[in-house]
Image: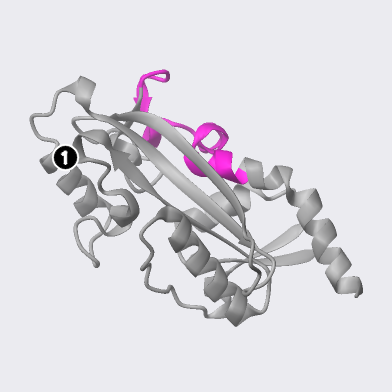
Amino acid sequence: MNKIVLASNNTHKVIEFKKILAKENIELIPQSDLGIPEIPETGLTFLENSILKARNASLIANLPAIADDSGIEVDALAGRPGIFSARYAGEQCDDEENNKLLLKELSGVPEERRTARYRCVIVYLKSHNHPTPKVFDSSWDGYIANKKVGENGFGYDPLFYLPEFKMTAAELTEEQKNSISHRGKALLAFKRELSKITADLNSETLK
């Protein structure tokens, strides 16, 4: 079984990755299991941050790596918080504080102008210095609700309203979310490439 290091210490993300990739012929090892710390996300885009995280984890673990960078883009805020979604209210702030700030900044904005999308960019690298990472980019459209609803999920899920379901992302079941979310769709695209990826890794092992 091929080993791939997951360049994340985010418990919620680790669970989502493992759930979606559970039946694949890979051993997904969270970087936290190897003592690899998070690195500063100094990129200007989701893609740049994903590559930074994947290269760091691959270098230290000496394994192929997969990383994602994701966040929420709100049209009424010119795309903010974007790449700063996890630290929107400050470096040491949590989901609750980030959600409060988002509601404050959208105070008085009418429903029709509260359009938003979750974005996720997943990067796979077979080695830390490989020049051409595989990139899987996906998005998930919705609206920002006026208040938090739901207990599932994490991040901005309690505020991310989905008109087609008439509920927020935090009200979806785990199975529902993983089949339609930004990260779920990007991971499904990654799964479709897995046969090529594992064949490539196996050929490297045989050399």
Instruction: Residue 94: give x, y in percent of width and height.
Output: 26, 58
Dot 1 falls on a residue whose secondary structure is: helix
Is 190 displayed left or right of 179 in the figure? right
Q: Is residue 25 visible?
A: no
Instruction: Residue 107: give x, y in percent of width and height.
Output: 9, 34
Q: Specify whether residue 161 is painted magenta.
A: no
Give the quadrant of residue 55.
bottom right
- Residue drawn 64% across and 41% down? 188
Residue underneath mark 1: 103
Establish if 42 lies above or below 111.
below
Instruction: Residue 42: give x, y in percent of width and height.
Output: 36, 68
Image quadrant where one finds the C terminus: bottom right
Stretch in magenta: 163-187
Image quadrant where one finds the N terminus: bottom right
Give the colour scheme shown.
Answer: one colour
Q: Residues within 10 Å of mark 1 (few under 14, many from 20)?
A: some
- Residue drawn 53% across and 75% down? 56
Query: Looking at the picture, which amino acid does disc 1 mark?
Result: Leu
- Residue drawn 49% across and 37% down? 181
Give the quadrant of residue 148.
top left
Establish if 173 lies above or below 21.
above
Outermost residue, right direction?
Answer: 206
Q: How many marks?
A: 1
Q: Specify whether residue 180 is painted magenta.
A: yes
Is 198 displayed left or right of 46 in the figure? right
- Residue drawn 60% across and 79% down? 59
Task: State whether the magenta stretch is mostly helix, strand or loop.
Answer: helix
Is 172 displayed left or right of 33 in the figure? left
Is 194 displayed left or right of 128 in the figure? right
Instruction: Residue 57: give x, y in percent of width and height.
Output: 56, 73
Establish if 82 lies above or below 117.
below
